[in-house]
Image: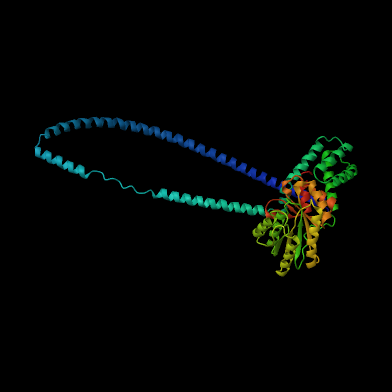
Amino acid sequence: MGLFDIFKRKKKKNKAEEQAQSNSDGEKNRNESDDELNSASQSNDFNGDVNSSEIKDNKTDSSEDNVINEQSEKSEIENHHEEVDSNAEKVAEYADSNLDDTKTKESKIDNNDEKANNLEQPEQVEPNVSEENQESESTNDDFENANDVSLEDEENNIESDNENEEEKYDKGLKKTRSSFMDKLNRLFANFRSVDEDFFEDLEDTLIESDVGFDMAVKLTDELRDEVKLQNAKDSEAVKNVIVKKMIDIYDEAGNGENNNINLVNDGLSVIMFVGVNGVGKTTTIGKMAKLYKNQGKKVLLAAADTFRAGAIQQLNVWAQRDGVDIVKKEEGSDPAAVVYEAVQKAQKDNYDVLFVDTAGRLQNKVNLMNELAKMKKVLTREIPEAPHEVLLTLDATTGQNALNQAKLFKEVTNVTGIVLTKLDGTAKGGIILAIRNELHLPVKYVGLGEKVTDLSKFNPSEYVYGLFKDLVN
């Protein structure tokens, strides 16, 4: 099954899943709407009951008010009689006030004593225990909420690390896919017919999309016959033919290609990394060391880039972070001597994988070629098949410059594969098409993000789908 067949199958599968999800969401919305209508109906019934109850309560209140008014009138008459009786009592009390002075004084003394005894004692104010408990409970709640947030963040990080391969390629190729689609849309905005002007514009568009000059020319030449053969006239039909032909050319160029890392089943595997400074070579070594260690392999790093300032320290930081061993010397020392010590240690202590970092002085090809040749000589003297891989690290953001670097490094050493970094941060991901078509070198790993787990084995079918999925209906 070819790549385009796999592409079409994935497209149909994802369309079916999206339709199923859409139907599920529609059913959920209808159920929610029905629930809201039922709730509104129940609310209206309840309001009707409340209104009738209020009418009854108003009638009851009216009858009660009449009774209260009658009782009030009777109470006023009784109060008038009581006032007359009170005045009579005051006259009698005034007559009794002329009693013996002694009794009056004693009475006053007794009254004063009673007032003294009846003085109110100050109330004891007890501490508000409930408020303290509330503050304590509030603090505990805040602590528990903070823990919940922390756990939620950890779960999100775990979920992001466990993204499946399709999601990683989808996110990593988003900029490239969007840029390529914009260029094609601009091309078809003025589409009138498939003529020679159209093919010239298409060729320019493909070159701007970093698919490579050779592939752009080859594609337009083959499309001239393909469009006529399929009788494609409208823009969508022509766009589908373009995408199909690009995938077919990419598939044919990779016939027999091996995207796996060549590892020894029993013994030490040596992987050498080459590439210019600044492309992410040392970072790639650190990420791959972590991946292989997580697979249960014993990993050793060799800091053979003794020319670039800070290269040894940078690789040493990765070794400490990954929990793997490293062989290093002082800056400016002989890289071949570092490789020799690393091979000796790896064989003696039964390491599974040795990663060798090298300098990237491409501007001085002769010195770089001699340096790499000397390191290879040391390796093959100890292990005849070594190095088992020579991986060229390229920065995807440099586009055609990356392709030129690959051509130069192929002249300097025997490159066996490509590691393409920073693919998620560029709109020039089409460079993979050019690498396979012009160099016939397999891309073995791609960087789809900043995390260690975002360095992924290259999957051609996922790459093709992630690049073209929005271009074909």
399 or 58: which is nearer to us?
399
Q: Position of residue 88 (x, y in %)?
A: 17, 31
Q: Position of residue 161 (x, y in %)?
A: 66, 54
- Relative vertical location of residue 414 with respect to residue 214 in this rendering, above or below: below
Q: Residue furthest front?
A: 332
Horizontal side, residue 107 vs residue 71: left or right: left
Horizontal side, residue 58 vs residue 30: left or right: left
- Relative vertical location of residue 278 with respect to residue 341 in this rendering, above or below: above
155 or 67: which is nearer to us?
155
307 or 23: which is nearer to us?
307
Would you identify the image quadrant in which residue 115 lies? top left
Q: Quadrant of the C terminus?
A: top right
Residue sitting at x 68%, y 51%: 450
Would you identify the image quadrant in which residue 69 lies? top left
Residue sitting at x 18%, y 41%: 112
Q: Position of residue 206 (x, y in %)?
A: 82, 43
Would you identify the image quadrant in which residue 265 lies? bottom right
Q: State how many labels appear.
A: 0
- Relative vertical location of residue 78 with respect to residue 377 in this rendering, above or below: above
Q: Residue furthest bottom?
A: 348
279 or 44: which is nearer to us?
279
Residue sitting at x 26%, y 45%: 121
Q: Quadrant of the N terminus?
A: bottom right
Q: Position of residue 279 (x, y in %)?
A: 74, 51
Mark yes or no: residue 460 visible: yes
